[in-house]
Image: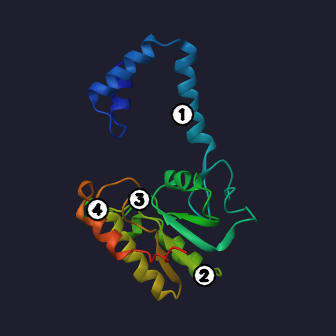
Amino acid sequence: MNRLVDQLGRLPGLGRRSAQRIAFFLLKSSTEEALALASAIHDFKTDLKICGQCGNVADVNPCSICTDTQRDPQTILVVEHPGDIVQLETTGQYRGVYHVLMGHLSPLDGIRAGDLNIEPLLERVTTQDIQEVILGLHPTQEGDGTAMYLADQLHAAGVNVSRLARGLPVGASLDSVSKAVLGDAIAGRNPMNAMQ
C-alpha cells in the first residue's frame, strides 16, 4: 500500500492524501478494474512513440498527422504539449502540421532552450520548404517568453511567423477579464464591415 501511495503521490497535482484516496479506491475495485488500469499504463509506456518529425505522441512513427497527404506540410503550428494538438484538432479548422516543444522556457525552473524540442523545429524550417510557422503557445508569461525567443530564431531563419489570435472570449464581459486579455483584444482587433 505504501509503495503504491508513494508512486501515485509522484504524479503532478496529487498529494499524499489524494494518492491514498486513489489507493483505497483501487483496493475496493475489482481485480479486473485494477489490472485494466495497470495494463493501460503499461501499454501507454511501451506502445506509444514520439513522432520523429513533429514530436507528437502516437502509436506510429511518423505520426498520422505528419503522413496525411491532405495536410499542408508548409505550415507548422508550434504547441507546448501533445494535448494541445488534441484540442486544436477538435476545431477542424487547421489543416497544416504541428511541432511539439514539450514545454516552455522557464529560466527560474531551469528550463532552457536546449531542454525543449526547439533545435528540430529550426532544422525543419531550414531543410524543408516551410512558408509559415504559427506559434500556438499558452498565453502565460513563460509561453509569451518562449514565443518571443522562437520568433527571433525563426525570423533569422527567414520564415514567416505568426501567433494564434487572442482576446475577449465569447460571452465575456469587459469587467470579468484581466488587463492582459483586454490588451490582447485591443491589439488584435478586427475591422468590421458596414451592414448592407
Q: On residue 103, which mark appears?
A: 3
Which residue bears the numbered disc 1?
41
The residue located at (68%, 71%) in the rendering is: 72
Is the C-beta separation of discs 2 and 4 under 8 Å? no
- Split into 4 quadrants, where in the image is the N terminus? top left
- Could you tell me the amino acid type at mark 2? Gln
Which residue bears the numbered disc 4?
110
Which residue bears the numbered disc 2?
131
**Other residues around mark 4 within 10 Å, as few (<14) / some (14–19) / many (≥20):** few
Furthest residue in direction front, as rendered: 196
> Of callouts 1 and 3, which one flags the residue occurring earlier in the amino acid sequence?
1
Q: Is residue 156 visible?
A: yes
| Residue 127 locus on image (x, y percent) | 62, 81
**Other residues around mark 2 within 10 Å, as few (<14) / some (14–19) / many (≥20):** some
- Split into 4 quadrants, where in the image is the C terminus? bottom right
- Could you tell me the amino acid type at mark 1? Ile
Relative to residue 55, is residue 130 depicted above or below?
below
| Residue 29 locus on image (x, y percent) | 48, 13
> Which of label 1 and label 3 is nearer to you?
3
Q: Secondary structure at mark 3?
A: loop
- Whole-Å distance between the Cαs marked 2 and 4? 32 Å
> Of callouts 2 and 4, which one flags the residue occurring earlier in the amino acid sequence?
4
